[in-house]
Amino acid sequence: MNTAVLLWGVLFSAIGLGFFVYGRRQRMAVPLVCGVALMIYPYFVENTYVLVAIGAALMGVPYFVRF
């Protein structure tokens, strides 16, 4: 594991925590699920480019999908 993967993982996990708290307080499923996914997926992805691509996609989902 290199430093870039570690730092990107910390960044996306912190953003995921924000989405999780927001989704829980507003009782919205999409930000809640995206928040959990953002906190968990960095443990399983080791390629930096894939990590950033998945993180950007998961961050964009709550803005386009509203329930």
Image (cartoon, rainbow, N blue to C red):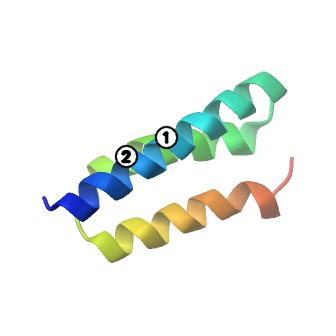
Nearest the eye: 32 or 14: 14
Secondary structure state at the residue bearing disc 2: helix
Q: Residue at x 55, y 45 (%)?
A: 15
Outermost residue to the right:
67
When the figure is inspected, residue 7 is found, relative to residue 28, above or below; the finding is below
Q: Residues within 10 Å of mark 1 (few under 14, many from 20)?
A: some
Nearest the eye: 66 or 7: 7
Residue 41 position, x and y percent, is 38, 50
- Residues at marks 2 and 1, CA–CA distance in whole angstroms: 6 Å
When the figure is inspected, residue 37 is found, relative to residue 29, above or below; the finding is below
Relative placement, left or right, of 5 versus 28 is left
Residue 37 position, x and y percent, is 50, 46
Secondary structure state at the residue bearing disc 1: helix
Outermost residue to the bottom:
49
Q: Please give the residue where the numbered disc 2 appears in the rendered image.
A: 10
Relative placement, left or right, of 5 versus 41 is left
Residue 61 position, x and y percent, is 69, 60
Q: Residue at x 62, y 58 (%)?
A: 59
Q: Residue at x 80, y 35 (%)?
A: 28
Nearest the eye: 42 or 66: 42
Outermost residue to the top:
25
Q: Quadrant of residue 48?
A: bottom left
Circle 2/circle 1 CB separation < 8 Å = yes
- Quarter of the image with the N terminus in it: bottom left
The kind of residue on which mark 1 rests is Ala
The kind of residue on which mark 2 rests is Val
Q: Please give the residue where the numbered disc 1 appears in the rendered image.
A: 14
Q: Residue at x 37, y 57 (%)?
A: 8
Q: Residues within 10 Å of mark 2 (few under 14, many from 20)?
A: some
Relative placement, left or right, of 23 versus 19 is right
Q: Quadrant of residue 32?
A: top right
